[in-house]
Image (spheres, rainbow, N blue to C red):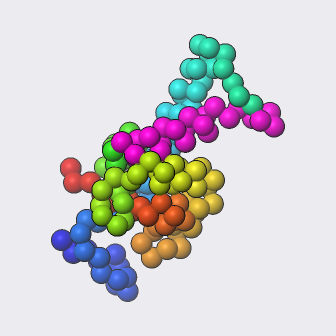
């Protein structure tokens, strides 16, 4: 299948790239799930890990959840609902654990994700460092 991203955009072959809005909504769903679990853990067990007065459990939970989901499969629950997946840009398979962790850490920093607006294929620094690409999943 061949797709065109715009009049002056280079041609790509294979699956279509995931739109930025779908990527953002998937991330929002995943972060919300992590916040809910984090608050439930805090409520049920009273576990909080604070640094500079900020609870670090949601961030740690997000890193483990996101990296684990991408190392086990190619989607987080948010990606599943938005019908997108994150695969290796090299071979189209799932990411190894170390690349999933690297991608999750960089995505957590927010700035690398913002660089996706300036890349012709909307790959942010977290995608480039993790050698990953976000694709649409057929229904």
Numbered circles on residues, count? 0
Q: Farthest residue to the left: give it.
A: 1
Quadrant containing the N terminus in the rendered view: bottom left
- In this view, 73 is above or below 40: below
Q: Name the foreground residue: 19 vs 127.
A: 127
In the rendered image, residue 115, in percent from the top left (x then y), is placed at 56, 67
- In this view, 18 is above or below 139: below
Main secondary structure along the magenta-highlighted residues: helix
Q: Residue at the location (71% across, 32% down)?
A: 55
Left or right: where does residue 39 sit relative to residue 133?
Answer: right
In the rendered image, residue 97, in percent from the top left (x then y), is placed at 44, 48
- In this view, 118 is above or below 42: below
Q: Farthest residue to the right: give it.
A: 52
Q: Residue at the location (48% across, 60% down)?
A: 130
Q: Residue at the location (47% across, 44% down)?
A: 67
Q: Residue at the location (49% across, 33% down)?
A: 33
Left or right: where does residue 51 sit relative to residue 18?
Answer: right
| Magenta-colored span | 51-72
Q: Is residue 55 magenta?
A: yes
Can residue 45 be seen from the camera position used here?
yes
Instruction: Give the quarter of the image for residue 36.
Output: top right
Left or right: where does residue 83 sit relative to residue 1?
Answer: right
Q: Name the foreground residue: 1 vs 20.
A: 1
């Amino acid at each position: 299948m061949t797709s065109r991203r715009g009049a002056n955009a280079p041609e790509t072959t294979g699956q279509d790239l995931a739109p930025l809005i779908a990527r953002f909504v998937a991330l929002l769903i995943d972060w919300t799930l992590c916040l809910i679990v984090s608050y439930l853990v805090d409520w049920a067990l009273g576990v909080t890990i604070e640094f500079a007065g900020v609870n670090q459990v949601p961030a740690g939970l997000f890193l483990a959840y996101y990296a684990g989901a991408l190392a086990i499969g190619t989607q987080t629950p948010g990606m599943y609902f938005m019908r997108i997946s994150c695969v290796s840009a090299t071979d189209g398979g799932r990411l190894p654990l170390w690349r999933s962790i690297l991608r999750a850490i960089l995505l957590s920093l927010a700035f690398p994700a913002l660089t996706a607006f300036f890349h012709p294929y909307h790959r942010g620094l977290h995608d480039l460092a993790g050698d990953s690409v976000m694709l649409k999943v057929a229904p």
